[in-house]
Amino acid sequence: MAAPTLQQPSFLLANLKADSTTKPLLQRCQDLVKIIDEYPAKELHLIFPWLVESVFGSLDGIIAGWNLRLLHSRSNEYNIAMEFLNPSGPMMKLVYKLQAEEYKYEIPVNYLPGPVKACIQEGVLPDCPLFHKKLQFPLSGLLTLNIALNPFEFFMFNFACCLITPKSYPPGQHGSSTDSAYFVLVDTYLKYFLPSEGSVPPSPFSDSRGSVTAPSPRSSSGSFAGYGVHSPSLLKHHIFHQPSVNADPAAQEIWRSETLLQMFVEVWLHHYSLEMYQKLQSPQVKLALLQYRLSMSSMPYQPYAPPGSGTLHTYQEPFSPTEEHVLVVRLLVKHLHAFSNSLKPEQLSSSPSAHSHTHTSPLEEFKRVVVQRFVQQKLYLFLQHCFGHWPLDASFRAVLETWLSYIQPWRYTGEKTNAQPEQSRTENRTVPDKWESFVQENLLMYTKLFQVFLNRAVRTDLVNAKNALMVFRVAKVFAQPNLAEMIQKGEQLFLEPEHVLHHRQPRGYLTPGQGGSYLSSRQRVVTDMVFRVKSHVYSLEGQDCQYKQMFGTELRGAIMKLIQIIAQARQTAKRISDHSSEVAANNSFLSWFGLGSSELNNTFPGAEPEESGECLKKTHEFLDRALENLCQIFKLNQGQLTQLISNLGSSQDDGNCKQLPDCIQSENGLILTDLGRRQIINGLRRFDVQYQGDPELQPIRSYENALLVRLFYQISSLLNDRFGGHMEALCSRPDFLGRLGRHYLTDPESNSRLKQSPMSRQTVEKSRRPRLSLRPLASYRTLLLLLLLYALGALLCFGPASSTALILAGGFLYGLLMTLFGDKLKTH
């Protein structure tokens, strides 16, 4: 400590950087614990950005940090990292120590979520209060714009970015496990800063100066025009004229909780495509920008603007969330429901208008609005993007379960233990009436996303048990008693005409004691419900949205289409199962000689290896139960459904599976249509795909002698090159000799096979060319047959030459008979 304080921090930082490459993690953490305890905040201030980067990695992904997403409980460093980064651990102690001194740390705007960055570059105040009054304007202009965060915000921002920043991990490793150190830390932070029971533990260091700006004071209308909703009154302000945010002293109690949640939501959910970004730009925003630019154009001096800031269409952000990203988002959703549902019944029943800070703690008030105000809009856009861009495979299950977790908050009320199997929690459980307001205020989460999922389901291979399970899960959730009625009521409220709404609304809200009536009180309730539903839909989809009813005629037709595809998938699963049984029955000893089935190790074309008999049974069970639930949701007539499935089954039995997929003929062969692609995906029709190369160059089979195959190929090639013209002339004759030549020199089944296979014309013509093929003589089956014939000839006292002549004569007579009577035998 004898060294001057101005040089000590740089010396300390240099030592820590040197130790990071030589000392193990345990020793480094022990040294850091001592440094955090002994050094003052002024000296710790300079090492904090480096320490955060060395733990979580750099924002550009070049520095991997401690690789928290790869640390598992089996690792030796797991417990060390968890203890150091615990909410009550040394790292958080350092954060609080710096927080008490009001230090700030800058982050370039380029590392902010795409929509936030675009707003700032456009000169519009972001809708998230977290980024208000934090912009730092350097002398060079907006090109190097930064935001200044306090230590807690800086720590949580880097922690949240650790999930979405691309990292260069070692080969064969990827962070997608729910038992990684990062996943467990997210869960730990959520439980600590958003507790379902009790309050947030106080900071060990007093922060009497209020270094954290509290969010705007909440009002009764905050649920509709507050955080997460593009409010014109907020967005029309330009960043050059930032309004002052009134600090709420009571909010200081939960500022860490709000900051953590806002960081998680902004970094993990505030991403969407360019089309969605343009859609969200309301006319009020564009009008405000136009007015600002007109006012600026009349000024003698105009501030510097970055290139491309003249339009709202400059937003570009490639957004491809990973499965790990979605799993962490689901963890956030589940915890927020549990956090919100822990609100005391007396606080939950009180109306927002009667709410008072004197009777409710800030944490209880935070629980009331946390889902609707902080999460709803960005999660909706996040899920909508995932539904539209995720691959059509089983990995979509993570996105699906995140959606189902959000629309079922009653699963996280604490009334039942989490030890129950996930798929049995909704079994025969009526949705309580108290959740009707939640369904109405999240109507699009139910209706719009269900329609998008329906569009995915009809394009998915439902023969796969994992895909069938997803359809079953959705149908099972929406079939919960009372849920469909709540959704229908919410749609009716949204479709309430505006003129009827104004006609119903009384001129004055009078109580019965003031001359009013109880009917007017009921009208106010209905009017308020209509306002909530309309505000929700318009804030997410815009004023000009074209709403499709979930229980309307158009969607009912789409449901019938899905039911047809489900029934077809059931038929396909049955055919695959039957085919697999037949192939297994043909698997005998004689297959080694080529006498068995040629598809001994293959399943039905289009099936996946995992689709064994057990998986197909699960597929059938999932699809059957999905059909039952869909009928229950949409009140479908069971008789019509049975008739539809039986008609479909009879058409399948009539040979539909042997037809080609729907396609069109072109110069290069057959081209699939969209209907044909769906038929192939669901296994309804298929091409009889055959080997399309030179038949003589097919891979050597296990039932063929490799040496003889190569020898006979050389011989037949010489003969075909030498006498190819004579063979073509012979086979082109229309008389009996031409038919006999075609029997020996061409494949009689090639024409029928080629019609069932998508081949080009050149390949078809090349395959029809007559040639001599000696390859069948290299088959062990043919060799065994010849050996038996020679043995029989020896028993009858025939020599090798005589036996060979008799075999050739027999082969010639067989070809002669097939040429004469082959057509008649085929017709019979």
Image (tube, rainbow, N blue to C red):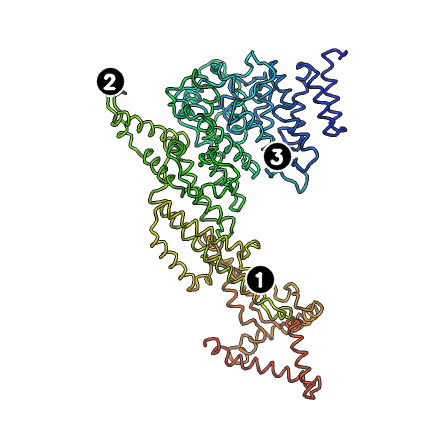
Q: Is residue 665 left or right of residue 5?
A: left
- Sooner in the amino-acid sequence: mark 2 or mark 1: 2
Q: Amino acid at mark 2?
A: Gln
Q: Is residue 304 left or right of residue 656?
A: right
Residue situated furthest bottom in the rendering: 797
Residue 514 tag number: 2
Q: Amino acid at mark 1?
A: Gln
Residue 796 x, y percent position in the rendering: 67, 88
Between the residue at mark 2 and the residue at mark 1, the CA separation in whole angstroms equals: 89 Å
Residue 537 visible? The answer is no
Mark 1 or 3: the one toward you:
3
Residue at the image point whose x is 36% and y is 37% from the top: 486
Q: Amino acid at mark 3?
A: Pro
| Nearer the observer, 811 or 580 | 580
| Disc 2: CA contacts within 10 A as few (<14), some (14-19) or many (>=20) | few
Between the residue at mark 1 and the residue at mark 3, the CA separation in whole angstroms equals: 43 Å
- Sooner in the amino-acid sequence: mark 2 or mark 3: 3
Q: Secondary structure at mark 2?
A: helix
Residue 166 tag number: 3
Mark 2 or 1: the one toward you:
2
Residue 11 x, y percent position in the rendering: 75, 18
Q: Which residue is mark 1?
A: 692
In the rendered image of this protein, does residue 771 appear above or below residue 451? below
Between the residue at mark 2 and the residue at mark 3, the CA separation in whole angstroms equals: 65 Å
